[in-house]
Image (tube, coloured by chain):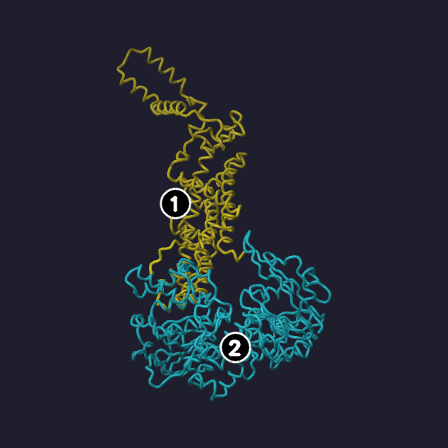
Chain colours: A yellow, B cyan
Amino acid sequence: MPFDKPHAVSPGLWALAWKRLRSDGVAMVSLAIVAVFLVMMLLSGTGLIAKDWAKEVGVNYAPPTFVGPAEPGAGATSAPGATSASDKPTELPIEDPLADALAAIRNEGAAAPKAPEASVAEDNKTVDPLAEVMADIRSKAVENVAAEARAPTLPLGGDKWGRDVLKKVIKGSETSIFVGLAAACVATLLGTVFGAVAGYYGKWLDDFFNWFYSVFTAIPYLLLILAVAAVLQQKGTFTIVLILGLTGWTGTFRLIRGEYLKHKGREYVQAADAIGASNARRMFVHIFPNISHVVLVQLSIYTVAFIKSEVILSFLGFGVPVDVVSWGSMLNEAQNELILGKWWQLAAAGTFMAVLVTAFSLFTDALRDALDPKLK
Amino acid sequence: METLLSVRNLRINFRLDKDTTFEAVKGISFDIPKNATVALVGESGSGKSVTSLSMLGLLPKENASVLPGSEIRYDGRNLLELDAVELRKMRGADISMIFQEPMTSLNPVFTAGFQLGEVLRLHMGLSPGAARKRAIALLDEVGIPDAEYKINAFPSQMSGGQQQRVMIAMAIACEPKLLIADEPTTALDVTIQKQILDLIAALQRKHQMSVLFITHDLAVVGEIADYVVVMRSGEIREQGPAKTVFENPQDAYTKALLQCRPRLDRRPVRLPVIEDFMGGSAHAMNLNERKRGVLSSDPIILDVRKLGKDFYTREGVFGRRKFEAVKDVSFKLPKGKTLGLVGESGSGKTTVGLTLMRLHEASAGEALFEGRDILSMTPREFMAYKRRIQIIFQNPYASLNPRFLIGQILTEPMMIHGVGSSTQDRTDLAFEMLQKVGLPEVSFYKYPHEFSGGQRQRIAIARCLTLKPDILICDESVSALDVSVQAQVLNLLQDLQDEFHLSYIFISHDLAVVKYISDQVMVMNQGEIVEIADSDEIYRHPQQPYTKKLLSAIPKGWHHGA
């Protein structure tokens, strides 16, 4: 009996949840903000924006454009630690204590009978062994000044080296959001698989995972992270993802284990057993769709939590390596700058983080309500 | 007769979402006289519980609204206009309520005595000592043995019947003038139900209070109600003295409710259903007697021998206590016949069903299916037999995966067992089964939550039928359904047996239902078989005292001794 008449398939859980979510103003605004951040992350990740974040485009500690340029000299005096050649581009040429003596020698040489050029060079070398190097440095410094006329102000200010804070914070967002999302995926995946196996099979498997869980949670969280960081040795973005993912699965494990315990006794699972569905089929085809909303909400909560964790770790210096910028490393730099009254890097990183985390948290709440309206 | 409480033009709306409302109660009026029992009868969705909740101001505020013009007069005041403080004074002291589920109505972390004492301290201002004394007296009054000792028991240490007795003790603690009982016996065994009904009737007489008894089952109230109010879809269909309503019902719906419950003395070929009385029935009413019984020449399809199932509970660190849920159960199931399995909760009847399905592993015994023991097979060997023994569970709300479309639910078993050669084949078969169980074709594209309980049970039946089983185990399959829906599903099962020659193992605590559907009845108690005989025989001439006790507890409706 073929069924040719037009028919409407009833909307499923996700369609209904989306409908509820769409009618929630706060949810849609926060979703839009999160989406903007995600697009920004993708663009920056593919190198379309903020590719040259490490380029020193402004004067060091260039203030934000809306504040106006700093008074001349303020930068030099307030940065006693900065001594590299590019620090003082306006004060060229470099001081040369031997300049007068060299000039006298040159004059003498000019008076003397003409010698072969090679011997002059030889002479110069004997008199000033650094002459060539100095000349090189001089010419390069002049070139640099010509190539980059350094901006006195930048849209959101500049850092110690004159890097654009706007580009830096975009690049930092990329790192932080990527770490948060990736670590949340790892932790949720681990927690869900462990929880499903422990809750569904029970018995010794459950005992084993519970034992494992108890040992894991018995260690103070930060200590555990430091320990894993120490074991993994090399620093890198993926290391941080791994650390957070490997230490963060415990909460999801408890939750998913409880859900599986609850659901495996339900009649629909028994009915699936009765029609001959295998264990794997019952676990993932039958039970999983019924708890997938819990997993999704966990993923969302974890993303926020891990973004914050990454910030804390990088702030403490255990996070991303020095050549990578993240919100945490920006905040870390900002603590020294703040003493000098350079607040813009802190403001930029802090604002970006606060906006995303708040929007993401609000979205998580709305998502939970939309998926489980009875809990409201 | 003096009126205690009168409901006038009560209208209650529920807000479903932003702009749709549902009229749950559509302007009803009735009176509760002093010192009388009024039964409010109706099936799910009739608005009977909503009506009773509105009397105590217990409706959920966020989505329920009582429309203006509604009135519930009690003692010269309109209960719907009272503020929260006045209502709280009223609750417990003047009007009190007992709920359906005693297991969830009592707080599991406090003792029965504490919870009972709390009511007395709050409402009557008794001192803790006096409250305790009164609590013991109350427990004694509601028939709890060793009240002195049981007062310190936690709800988990009591049986369901005892918990319901504690709930009743709490409800009558302050001598209310009106006791609202919302399906107080639905969750209980038939023998316990009888005791609770007797208790409520006795307390009503002794304390001279009025009782509003809410139920979906007319038969339950036949013996205790003075007045009956029949509700359907938010309207009152009929009301009047019990004698008139039972003996000379005017409304077609009331007649249907009275007829569609299976009776012990009659066995029509098809049970009458609501549609027979309200018009629009697909089958002609056929009230001729149906023959039942097992002949010695019937071929046997399943031979169960000395089946046993033990459960172990942990005790201490290493110890475990053995609990024998099923002991030494043997029976034969003839092909195309129905074996009824009755017993109270804890009798092991469900365990028998689950063990035969191998959803539990048996501890002892064998079950010969066409000469082969299905209990000792490897799971791989059993796969072929799994298809041929199927089960329909009790709760149709729980036995269908809420995230699956009906189409997926119906085609999945065929896919697992390789029934049908293609997806198209299976889809066609699924449509055929939907038609068999009387559901429209569009159901294929819907989710379980869009169906009512009876429709869901039809889907569960259709799922089993897709595998073309030989044996169908019905585990309390109609117990959760309204009386009229129950009749429809029983008729469906009967039709399917006539058509496919299925063998049923019908597990139920409801003896009238078992009597109607079964050829042979097996009575179980505490894991053992008490009695096994042809169904007519066991109801006419029960041999064992336990069977007699079960039979005498069946609510007889108005038809005393008929």
Q: CA distance from mark 1 to mark 2?
A: 66 Å
Which is more toward the observer, B289 or A53? B289
Give me the chain letter of mark 2: B
**Location of the N terminus of chain B (image quadrant):** bottom right
* Depicted A361 relative to depicted B355: above or below: above
Q: Quadrant of residue A136?
A: top left
Q: Residue at x 45, y 30 (%)?
A: A83
- The residue shown at (27%, 18%) is A119
Q: Mark 2: which amino acid?
A: Asp
- Label at residue A236: 1
Q: Residues within 10 Å of mark 1 (few under 14, many from 20)?
A: some
Taking the image as shown, residue B59 lies to the left or right of residue B284, namely: right
Q: Nearer the viewer, mark 1 or mark 2?
A: 2
Report the front residue among A269 and B545: B545
Q: Are marks 1 and 2 in contact (CB under 8 Å)?
A: no
Q: Residue furthest right?
A: B76
Q: Chain of mark 1?
A: A
Image vertical order of residue B336 relative to residue A219, above or below:
below
Q: Position of residue B214 (x, y in %)?
A: 59, 70
Q: Is residue A83 left or right of residue B377?
A: right
Residue at label 2? B189
The local crowd at label 2, few if under 14, some if 14 to 19, many if 20 or more residues have their Cα within 10 Å, is: some
Q: Is residue A252 above or below residue B122?
A: above
Under mark 1, the amino acid is Gly
Is residue A359 something that shows in the picture? Answer: yes
Element marked by disc 1? loop
Residue B32 lies left or right of residue B263; in this view the side is right
Residue B504 lies, in percent from the top left, at 39, 76
